[in-house]
Structure formats: C-alpha cells, structure tokens
Image (cartoon, rainbow, N blue to C red):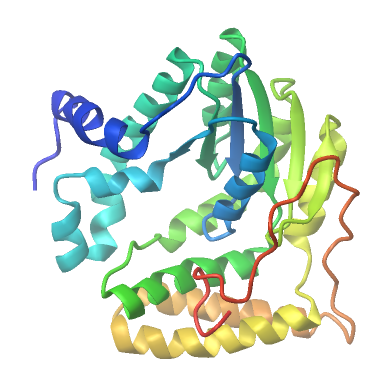
Amino acid sequence: MTEPSDAELERIWLSDILPGMYPGVEPSPEPVTYFLGAQPGAGKTRGQMFIQRLCPGYLMPVVGDDFRQYHPDYDWLMETDPLSMPDVTARAAGAWTGMAVEYADGNRISCVIEGTWRNAATVLDEARRARSLGRGTRAVLLAVPPALSRLGILSRFYEDMRTEGSARWTPPMAHETTVGNLPRTVPQVAGSGLMDRLTVLERSGNVLYDGDNPARFVAAWQQGFDRTLSADEIGFAATTWECLVGLCEEFTPNNLEAHHVLELIRADIDRSAGAGEQPDQPMEPEEPTIPPPMPCQPSDPTWVCGI
C-alpha cells in the first residue's frame, strides 16, 4: 500500500468524486452551511433527511466516510483487512472532505457537513469561514444516549457483513472519544455566536429544541444524551445485543474491540434496567417550527434482527 500523493488525491477528486457524487449541483442565492453532529452510530443519516426538508433546492452532502471508497486500496482493504481500513483511508477522506467544502463555498452551494463534533475547533473554524463568505450557518445535533449509538455502530457493521459479505468498521475508540468530548465541545459550539440557528433532534426525528438560545440548546442535548433507556428501548436493546453476540462469534470471533463494545452495551442495558421500575422516558419534543423528517421505521437497515 502506498499513500496517495496530494496530486493523486486532487486527480481522484476531479475525475471520480466530483462527477460521481455531485452531478447537477446548483448554486443558491442564499447558501447555508449546516453542521450536523453526533457520535458515530447515532443516526446522522436521519439528521440529513431532516435538514433536506429545511433546505429549499439543492443540498450538497459532505460526509467523510463516503469518500473512503475512492481510496486506491479501499477494495483490497475491505476484502483482506476491513478493521484497518478506517486508519489507512483517514488522510485521503479528510483531504476530500476539505475539497468538497471548498467546492461548496466557492460555488455558493448549500451543504451539510456531517461530523462527530469531538473537536470544537474543526466545527468553529469552518463556521467562521462560512460566515466570512456571507453564508448562513446552522447547527443540528442529535441527542442519542451512548447505549444506543454503541448498538448502532455494531449493528451497521454486522448487518452489512451478513448481507454483503463485507462492511466498513467504525473503531470503537472513535465512538468513546467522541462521547467523552461532547459534553465539553457542544457548549463551545453553541456559545460561539457563529451559528444562526440551533436544533436538537432525537434519533427518532423528534425536535427537542429549535431556536437561537445556546443554553436551551445545550440543556436539550444533555438531557437526551444522558437519559437512561425507556422500558421499550431496554427490550429493544437486549434483543439486538443477543443477535450481535451471535454475529460477532460468526464473523469476527477474534475482534477484541467488538467484544468490549458488547460488554459495554450489556452494562448499559443493566444500568438502565436498574435505574428504577420506571426508567426515564424519552424527552417530550418541543412543538417544531419546521416539518420533522419521517420517523425511524422498524425495518431501518442500520439495525439488525428486525430492529
């Protein structure tokens, strides 16, 4: 394996990614940059659906993970060493993400930049740049308990392994680092003064907060992020956990990281179940000022075993 040079990265961007992923892009008279954040496995695809309903006209998605497939060694890695794929493709995916944002900025195209927000400076630097270019800025954050996002990263991986024979691995450390950082970075983003509007969503699509008050934005996210699972979610998670244990043994019996995440998930379930006879229920959503996205369906392909 050889790391693509800067010239090779630019060539791939111009010849493959730009025409392949962004055909028919359209400028906007009032372009907006949406910053979509959450830890891995939280369901940011659903957040993209929500933002699409906010944005009239064309919206350019900028998702770093989607660029990994263009790395020259991607297919070989997925076939022979999928667990190392994220590290090997990280530099290229980051470079192409930057090129996509520059393209959107330079052509006045509204875009949604998907990220984890584990580093506030990454979000704020781009928000500052967007505002300097006369673009609107909006933060959309998913409030999802880590118990559910841990389920999400393993469910997505093993569902693809089961149905496709290969899958993109999300390093659990990336999840845990983000979970540890978000209580610090969310207030930094919210209080920066660089966002025109602030929105918090549940994974289901419920709007928990939509406005311009940083304190209320942070409080809504914190309550949704820190809550214990509801009774229905506990049963939901327990069924999924049992399925994942079997799939882990079938496809990756020697993956110690996956086994550790399964232990964390089991502890999450037990902790919520032991929180009382009436576990915390999901927050009541605020009356949305904008139309919500379609709710999560039980057949959502990011969940295995019918979840």
Q: Position of residue 112 (x, y in %)?
A: 55, 35
Is 166 situated left or right of 183 in this image? Answer: left
Q: Position of residue 46 (x, y in %)?
A: 60, 54
Q: Quadrant of residue 97?
A: top left
Determine the residue positioned at 61% across, 41% down: 52
Q: Is residue 247 above or below residue 121?
A: below
* Image quarter in which the C terminus is found: bottom right
Q: Position of residue 110 (x, y in %)?
A: 55, 25
Q: Is residue 307 above or below residue 191?
A: below
Determine the residue positioned at 72% across, 78% down: 233
Which residue is nearer to you in this view: 67 or 293?
Answer: 293
Q: Is residue 220 above or below residue 261?
A: above
Q: Is residue 221 above or below residue 77?
A: above
Determine the residue positioned at 54% across, 84% down: 241
Determine the residue positioned at 50% across, 68% down: 302
Residue 82 visible to the viewer? yes
Q: Position of residue 124 (x, y in %)?
A: 59, 25
Is 249 situated left or right of 46 in this image? Answer: left
Is 202 situated left or right of 247 in this image? Answer: right
Which residue is nearer to you in this view: 137 or 190?
Answer: 137
Q: Quadrant of residue 245?
A: bottom left
Residue 270 visible to the viewer? no
All told, the count of numbered labels is 0
